[in-house]
Amino acid sequence: MTLERILVAGWLLLAAAAGRAGDDDLVFIHHSCGRNWLNDSLHTALLAKAYIDERNDIYYGTDIQPASGRPDSLGGTPGDHTDMCHWIRWFNDYLEHVILHDCADGTNRIIMFKSCYPNSNIASDGTEPGDPFSSQRTLANYRAVYRHPDGPGGVYTNDGYIYHPLEDIFASHPDILFIPVTAPPRHYAPSDATTDVEGHRARTFNNWLKNEWLAAYNSNHPGFHNVAVFDWFDVLAYPDSDPDHPNRLRAEYGGESGDSHPNSAANATSTWFFASGPTNFLDQAWESFHNQDTDTDGLPDWWEREHCGNLTNMSAHSDQDSDHFSDLEEYRAGTDPLDPASLLRLTGIVARISRGECILHWLSVTGRTYTVSRTFSLASPDFLPAASNLPPTPPVNTWTDHISGTDRAFYRISTSP
């Protein structure tokens, strides 16, 4: 038996928007309100997303190591700390491991984070420029967490370490979708957990974050689309103009219960707005982030920035690692465009004539499934699937074909997300 082999460019069969679907995970940093929301309906809605492989949590008691060279600024159990003043520490000191937290494979491409309802008790306007490390709940301190008074590139110092405001951290990770979730409102009965002035400040901050700050971030980083603010406060609270309970947790969501944890009805409504409704927040945020292609070269912006840091060095026909696979083909195959050893190719083929077997070996990656197609003639090739939806077994996949009555076969391997 003579077996010849051809590896046809199977990735040409992929849709142009194919991406790393199988290893894109989501992590949510939260406490009890987030836990209740997840348990009621959010967990199921998130895992129903084709673009979310695993859903991970950082919660009370979670220990996570700081990045190399950074302090363990949140102590032995960082998961215990989710107040507004903690986020600058989270994203400067721990982000490296947050991205990998609890991932069986791949990375947390979506990072959600939320402070609990006490953070809606904003006691004063504060004094600009604010202190992002202060536990005092003021508008000035909250704003300082997200932006430096000197603008992008400005830094803070704390305990001898340099800290960047969140907007600069987010901009340095364009391959991550960051989702700040605003803190829930406070209940008003049987006793009021806040004041009209505090509630108004909470709404003022949330409006600033999702409107003024986010617009400035997007203007400074056009095409990134890697931050999306979900205003949970606004979903749950009476409006600022309500004559009786402005900016308090609505009665139907538990506002008269004496407990500021949103109830099951609140969580169901929140899931509809955030993840399951026909025009839900998360789908729109992911679409804008993941499929944005500013230069219309078939390569999404996040992928070009992740590998080259800009949108100018890559194109559909460029070949950064000179392995004769274009960057567009590398994107669609899920391989590394900067590593000449990372490409979709056969690494071995073994014919066992006595057994009527042909064993194929090829390089594989997480986040892809594979189809092996076969034909017995190249004169008028008609490749038909011999095996499909083969899961990846990185770094190499192996598949055995059982054939008889022929002295040659030709194979094509294709991949899909």
Image (cartoon, grey):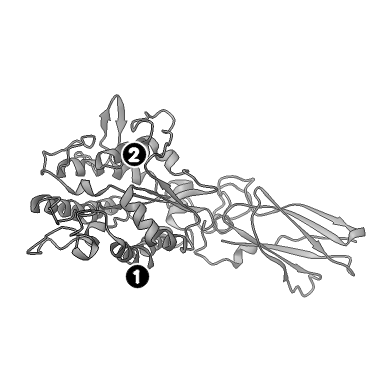
Give me the C-alpha separation between circle 1 and circle 2.
34 Å
Seen from this angle, which residue lies furthest top?
160
Using the image, determine if residue 331 lies above or below residue 268.
Answer: above
Left/right placement of residue 337 relative to residue 71 reads right
**Residue behind mark 2:** 80
Between 289 and 389, the one lying in front of the other is: 389
The amino acid type, in three-letter code, at marker 1 is Thr
Dot placed on the residue nearer the N-terminal end, 1 or 2: 2
**Residue behind mark 1:** 279
Using the image, determine if residue 107 lies above or below residue 9.
Answer: above
Question: In what element is the residue under mark 2?
Answer: helix
The amino acid type, in three-letter code, at marker 2 is Asp
Q: Position of residue 397 (x, y in %)?
A: 70, 53
Seen from this angle, which residue lies furthest left?
243
Identified at 18% across, 51% down, the residue is: 205
Left/right placement of residue 54 relative to residue 275 reads right
Identified at 22% across, 53% down, the residue is: 259
Question: In what element is the residue under mark 1?
Answer: loop
Label 1 environment density (alpha carbons within 10 Å; few <14, some 14–19, many ≥20): few
Q: Position of residue 53 (x, y in %)?
A: 50, 56
Between 50 and 299, the one lying in front of the other is: 50
Q: Quadrant of the N terminus?
A: bottom right
Q: Quadrant of the C terminus?
A: bottom right
Left/right placement of residue 364 relative to residue 59 reads right
Residue 329, which numbered label? Answer: none
Q: How many marks?
A: 2
Label 2 environment density (alpha carbons within 10 Å; few <14, some 14–19, many ≥20): some
Residue 8, quarter of picture: bottom right
